[in-house]
Amino acid sequence: MKRKAAAVLMLILYTVFVFAGCNKPEEPKKDDLIVIGMSQVGAESDWRQADTASMKSVFTEANGYRLLFEDARQDQENQFVAIRRFIQQRVDYIVVMPITEDGWDAVLKEAKDAGIPVILVDRMVNVKDDNLITAHVGSDFYAEGKKATDWMKKKYASAEELNIVHIQGTKGSTAQIGRTSALDDALKANNTWKLQARMDGDFTEAKTYEVMKEYLSNRETLPKIDVVYCENDNSAYGAIKALESFGYTCGKNGVSIVSFDATYNALVYCQKGKIALTVECNPLLGPLVESVIRTMEEGKVPEKNRYVEESAFEPENITEDLLASRKY
């Protein structure tokens, strides 16, 4: 009798389980999920936070993914640790936003030996074997810098001398290398351009404010500054804050602030005239990364490099509709 009662109970429970499941929308089985191991630089800027949000909105379980996300907190060694952990976890793909370009050969070879494709986002790496990288999705940073220097050349075409202060981003990062190279080439091509100072702002408002304030404090007289070339928007905010604390005017008839990223807040600064030019660097790269993965899931070979289209903005270009439509 006990056996019969147990069998009946099991049949009832099975029937309830099956019919209850029929009323729910079908979800991806856990075993069917594509597992992504992702190492992000950190959260040092508005751009970086928007990039992370884009990735997390795409790589969800509802879309067929399990995302293992690691924040490197601006430390390359943390990225190496994360990638080796992903290899041990046997993820399907590794997505990396490299902090700097050098030092990646060993850990990426480990990923290749494990048969795990590596996709670079935003920045690139300098490796001996290009086959260690499956694909790269991001921006052409030299082209961004060229947009800025072309604007400077046009705006100051009649100036007898152009005095420039340069705030660099994280040293050795692809964005820093590209944007710095564009400025260096323009300095060589325009003999009236004078580089007054070059400082490391590390892509942050706080660091830029510190170095700019220190630079101005250590001068007997305040220098003439025509342009501050900031390698991202957050550095521009720090530069403006420091300059204004010393009595400089940023904007019309004052110092021209050039920045990169064109995030929402930078567009507001630009609309108000505080930033003279902000060059777009689109952080919404999640869908492009997914397109690479979907291409590989179909057994096809993705493009090696895929650059996003980007614009540049001056105060007169910025409308309320543009601000309202900005997603980052």
Image (cartoon, helix red, strand yellow):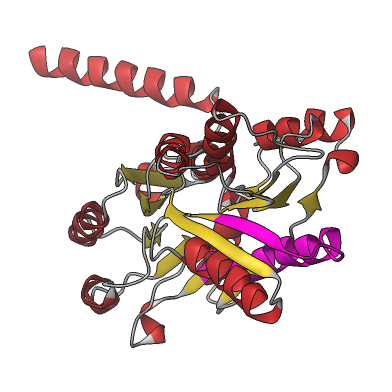
Q: Nearer the viewer, residue 224 or 156?
A: 224
Q: Nearer the viewer, residue 179 or 292?
A: 179
Residue 111, horizontal then vertical, whole percent: 27, 71
Using the rendered image of the protein, determine whether residue 123 is visible from the camera's viewpoint. no
The quarter in which the C terminus is drawn is top right
Q: Is residue 62 above or below residue 118?
A: above
**Residue 157 is covered by the magenta coloring:** yes
Magenta stretch in the rendered image:
136-165
Q: Is residue 36 above or below residue 58?
A: below
Q: Is residue 18 above or below residue 229?
A: above
Residue 128, horizontal then vertical, whole percent: 33, 87
Q: Nearer the viewer, residue 60 or 186?
A: 186
Residue 174, horizontal then vertical, whole percent: 47, 66
Left or right, 187 with respect to 172, comes to: right
Q: For the point 70% across and 36% down, which residue is it?
A: 250
Residue 91, horizontal then vertical, whole percent: 30, 58
